């Protein structure tokens, strides 16, 4: 079971935002999508989530085109965390998380749904603000409450594979919460969910992703394991900024250190 | 998942809070029902001919064949049945519709300042009514006589519906309706209809001006059983169907894309909310003229009391809207009796300062 983009292109007006990009999101994997601003990361995620129509190619869920699925069916299998969410009505954090259960129940949520919503808030590290109004939360707390909502949506998948699409899930988070959020994404992947995350921090991607896709101006520049893709050459090509890549002192992954422009890229 | 057992105690604490919330909502519901019953009995009882609440019950019981041992006069009976009851029922339906549609549109637009004016129902109705008054008499005098009393309501209803459909179509592109475009198109079309209305008003005669003014200020004065019969199907349809969209509207508050990802058929929800509002508000405005502020204030007050969940908000809004309009109508016809103040003036006079007070009060609280 997979969520797959097959040779997709997205053209809006004259701008080609994505050019024949393919990506297969499978159960149990955490795929990180990297790239400079405007490289097409969000466009790829929007194509996978059905928010924009592809001009060429297809997006398939379990081998069937996305358009052939009923919206409610997809919602039970796939959750999408938006980059930023502008909810300005005073729902409590708990109620926001509980909305993640919408695809799974009709009318009023049951006892089980409420337990899941609470557990999801706990997992996202925001259980202590469960009863506070969403509008009074800080940016980072809001982002984690939204994370709890999408976790609650795919909490129990049974036989089927669920998919979690995260658009810059760490953008408003402090250092500790950036790691705890990706650790949660990692746990879900290990429990069989196919996770895709757009990330800006290369070191987070190196540490948590199984597979990395690097985009540049709408095309795939490189893809593969962190070791294979996060090399000085590829990163400098993708971001047009000099970096030094070295083995991580503690973990088995590369460590990327950007070297600001103007200094020598090759101290040796 | 494994952490479920660990969260049990936290969950129970949350459940307690939730229970408090539910209790509070139940309390508000009881108050709203009491308010509605009071407003209803006061509205049918107070006036040139006074009818006590128990007499009201006795007269109503008599209509369905039950004789109660309570005395009432023949005049009281005919005033209640022929004058007060249709007026009060019309007030209930119109008040409920204005409030419930306001709440639903605010959810759809994710904007607490939205109301039916935004989708062109009232401005479209106004232009049609003014055009009928100013141009109709000379151009189609034969048709006018044929349609008789129903001409103005019919024009208002069709004008409102047509304007809403134009705004809805303008915002429609590639099979999707862009809510932000709908908002902007609404503003533009409202300005246009306002200009046409202004032009027509400018060329109107004094007698026509009086008619136009009367209609644009709103009143339940034209209430008859016929009017109730015309308005009831549209308004009841909306009052029954809108609450079925409550969960989808909750998801809409997160954002349209988010709602779609939660499995909501967003195009269907948009279409239904706009059409149901246009039908019900169009029919209401056609009979009563323009009545402002109910659709704006009622959802606001209720959100402060019971939160933004549309599953409660929509039915509660209908109840409070009905009570509020009955109260305003009672005020408008008793305070300068035997004359009547225009109802739209009363709702705005009460509504506007109250709304400001809510706004400023909220600001003070949120800045703490």
Image (spheres, coloured by chain):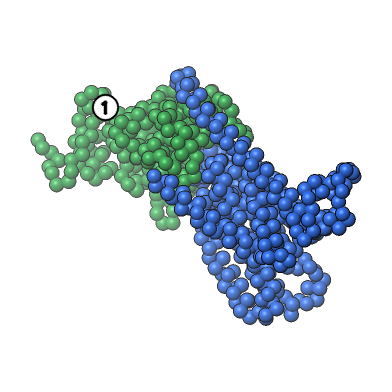
- Residue B69 lies left or right of residue A255; in this view the side is right
- Residue B228 appears at what percent x and percent y? 77, 56
- Give the structural element (helix, strand or loop) at label 1: loop
Q: Measured along the vertical axis of the image, is residue B166 above or below residue A45?
A: below
Local packing at callout 1 (Cα closer than 10 Å; few below 14, some 14-19, many 20+) is some
Q: Position of residue B86 (x, y in %)?
A: 78, 56
Q: Residue at x 72, y 50 (%)?
A: B40
Which residue is identified by label 1?
A253
In the image, residue B192 lies at what x, y percent? 56, 69
User: From this viewpoint, is residue B53 visible?
Assistant: yes
Quadrant including the C terminus of chain B: top left
Q: Looking at the image, which residue is at 55% across and 25% down?
A: A112
Residue B144 placement (x, y as % from top left): 78, 73
Residue in the foreground of this view, choosing between B131 and B224: B224
Point 61% across, 79% down: residue: B202
Q: Which chain is blue?
A: B
Q: Numbered disc 1: what chain?
A: A
Using the image as rendered, state which of residue B346 and residue B131 is in the foreground.
B346
Asked where in the image residue A199 lies, by quadrant, the reply is top left
The colour chain A appears in is: green
Residue sitting farthest toward the left: A268
Instruction: Kindly tell me whether residue A168 is visible in this rendering.
Output: no
Q: Give above or below for B186 relative to B242.
A: below
Quadrant position of residue A65: top right
Q: Residue at x 28, y 36 (%)?
A: A202
């Amino acid at each position: 079971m997979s969520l797959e983009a097959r040779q997709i292109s997205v053209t809006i007006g004259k701008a080609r935002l994505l050019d024949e990009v393919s990506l297969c999101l499978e159960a149990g994997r955490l795929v990180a999508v990297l790239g400079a601003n405007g490289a097409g990361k969000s466009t790829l995620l929007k194509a996978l989530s059905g928010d924009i129509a592809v001009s060429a190619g297809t997006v398939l869920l379990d081998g069937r085109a996305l358009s052939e699925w009923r919206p409610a069916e997809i919602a039970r299998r796939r959750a999408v965390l938006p980059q930023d969410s502008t909810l300005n009505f005073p729902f409590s954090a708990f109620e926001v998380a509980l909305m993640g259960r919408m695809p799974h129940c009709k009318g009023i949520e049951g006892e089980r749904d409420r337990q899941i919503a609470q557990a999801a808030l706990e997992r996202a590290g925001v259980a202590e603000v469960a009863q506070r109004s969403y509008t009074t939360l800080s940016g980072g707390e809001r982002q984690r409450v939204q994370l709890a909502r999408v976790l609650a949506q795919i909490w129990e998948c049974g036989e089927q594979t669920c998919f979690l699409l995260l658009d810059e899930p760490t953008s408003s988070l402090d250092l500790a919460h950036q790691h705890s959020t990706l650790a949660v994404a990692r746990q879900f992947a290990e429990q069989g969910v196919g996770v895709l995350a757009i990330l800006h921090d290369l070191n987070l991607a190196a540490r948590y992703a199984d597979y990395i896709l690097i985009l540049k101006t709408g095309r795939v520049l490189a893809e593969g394991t962190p070791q294979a893709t996060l090399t000085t050459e590829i990163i400098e090509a993708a971001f047009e900024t000099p970096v030094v890549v070295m083995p991580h002192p503690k973990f088995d992954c590369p460590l990327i250190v950007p070297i600001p422009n103007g200094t020598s890229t090759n101290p040796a | 998942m494994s952490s479920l057992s660990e969260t049990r105690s936290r969950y129970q604490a949350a459940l307690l809070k939730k229970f408090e919330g539910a209790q509070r909502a139940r309390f508000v519901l009881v108050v709203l029902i009491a308010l509605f019953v009071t407003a209803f009995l006061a509205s049918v009882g107070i006036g040139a001919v006074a009818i006590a609440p128990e007499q009201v019950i006795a007269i109503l019981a008599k209509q369905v064949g039950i004789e109660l041992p309570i005395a009432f006069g023949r005049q009281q009976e005919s005033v209640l049945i022929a004058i007060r009851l249709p007026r009060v029922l019309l007030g209930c339906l119109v008040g409920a519709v204005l409030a419930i549609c306001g709440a639903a549109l605010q959810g759809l637009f994710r904007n607490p300042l939205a109301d039916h004016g935004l989708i062109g129902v009232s401005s479209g109705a106004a232009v049609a009514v003014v055009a009928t008054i100013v141009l109709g008499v000379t151009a189609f005098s034969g048709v006018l006589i044929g349609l008789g009393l129903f001409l103005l309501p019919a024009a208002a209803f069709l004008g409102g519906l047509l304007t809403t459909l134009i705004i809805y179509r303008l915002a429609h592109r590639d099979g999707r309706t862009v809510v932000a475009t709908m908002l902007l198109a609404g503003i533009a079309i409202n300005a246009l209809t306002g200009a046409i209305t202004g032009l027509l008003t400018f060329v109107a005669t004094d007698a026509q001006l009086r008619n136009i003014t009367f209609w644009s200020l709103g009143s339940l004065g034209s209430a008859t059983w016929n009017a109730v019969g015309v308005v009831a199907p549209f308004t009841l349809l909306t009052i029954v169907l809108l609450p079925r969209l409550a969960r989808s509207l909750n998801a809409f508050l997160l954002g349209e894309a988010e709602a779609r990802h939660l499995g909501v058929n967003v195009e269907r929800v948009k279409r239904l909310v706009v059409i149901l509002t246009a039908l019900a508000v169009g029919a209401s405005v056609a009979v009563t003229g323009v009545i402002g502020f109910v659709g704006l204030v009622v959802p606001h007050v209720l959100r402060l009391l019971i939160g933004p969940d549309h599953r409660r908000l929509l039915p509660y809004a209908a109840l409070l809207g009905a009570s509020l309009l009955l109260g305003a109508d009672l005020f408008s016809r008793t305070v300068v009796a035997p004359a009547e103040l225009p109802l739209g003036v009363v709702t705005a006079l009460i509504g506007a300062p109250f709304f400001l007070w809510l706004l400023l009060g909220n600001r003070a609280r949120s800045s703490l």
